[in-house]
Amino acid sequence: MERRLGSFSVLTSKFFNRDPRRVARSLLGKLLVRKTPQDTLIGRIVETEAYLGEGDAAAHAVSGKTARNFVLFGPPGYAYVYFIYGSYFCLNVSCLPDGIPGGVLFRALEPLTGLEEMAAARGIKLVEPDGPRLQRHESAARKQISLLRSISSGPGRMCEAFGITRERDNGKDLTSSRSDLQLADDGYRVARVAVTLRVGISKSADELLRYAIAGNAFVSGPKLR
DNA sequence: TACATGATGCCCT
DNA sequence: GGGCATCATGTAG
């Protein structure tokens, strides 16, 4: 089940020093990498949302810098992690130059490596971790795909799978080769991008700022075309 | 499959 | 004290 990946390069700060809309779209197909003592967890980014500064009422940055959101106002390429609904964390990356707020929310990943550790972090028991017999059992294969999808399809779910918390990761430089949480490019090309309304917001809800890899099974929520 | 609902804790007014 | 960039679970169709 685990896939072998070719070499990849860590995204630079320059990549994030742009409008969040362009960063959100460009991040599709890139990799989120977490180094743990046991393993390296890798997921492909399949769904993102852009959050702007002034004028975006849904953005945490809208009413100015606070103790919670200060990372969004800092230099590009840093992790903004916040706690939501009493239970979940959400991961963003800061965009635009130091002093100008903006960011991209990561909404879903396609898990590639470290499946066992990610599933365990989510309290999910995979049917056949290595799956050599999967092809012979249709129902087991379907169940496995459904379980894999539930690992990191959603902003709260993917943070739980990657062990991302505010205490551990907020303010971390995601562009540093020394970081245990990085964003990387392995050369993967996205065929088609779907642009839709953002999920779960009530203000500025009519903006098309959600980006997803069209047809990808690991995108959160109802299926897109 | 689709939708409604409750849980839960922190931030900011 | 209100509201929240969510999720799991339940019920109905």
Image (spheres, coloured by chain):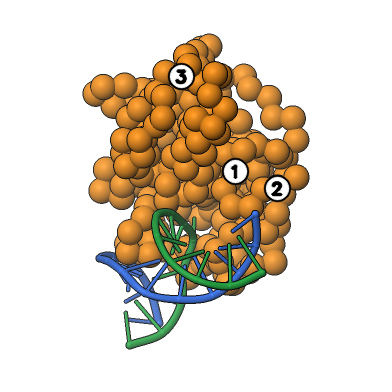
Chain colours: A orange, B blue, C green
Q: Which residue position holds label 1?
A: A219
Q: Position of residue A178 (x, y in %)?
A: 33, 24
Image depth: mark 1 or mark 3 in front: 3
Labels 1 and 2 positioned on one and the same chain: yes
User: Which residue corresponds to the image point at 60% horizontal and 65% vertical from the top-left?
Assistant: A56
**Which amino acid, by three-letter code, is at mark 1?**
Val
**Which amino acid, by three-letter code, is at mark 3?**
Gly
> What chain letter is assigned to the residue under label 1?
A
- Which label's residue is closer to the chain start, 1 or 2? 1
Q: Secondary structure at mark 2?
A: loop
Whether residue A60 sits left or right of residue A30 in the image: it is left
**Whether label 1 touches label 2, CB < 8 Å:** yes
Q: CA distance from mark 3 to mark 2?
A: 28 Å
Q: Residues within 10 Å of mark 2 (few under 14, many from 20)?
A: some
Q: Residues within 10 Å of mark 3 (few under 14, many from 20)?
A: some
Q: Which residue position holds label 3?
A: A131
> What chain letter is assigned to the residue under label 3?
A
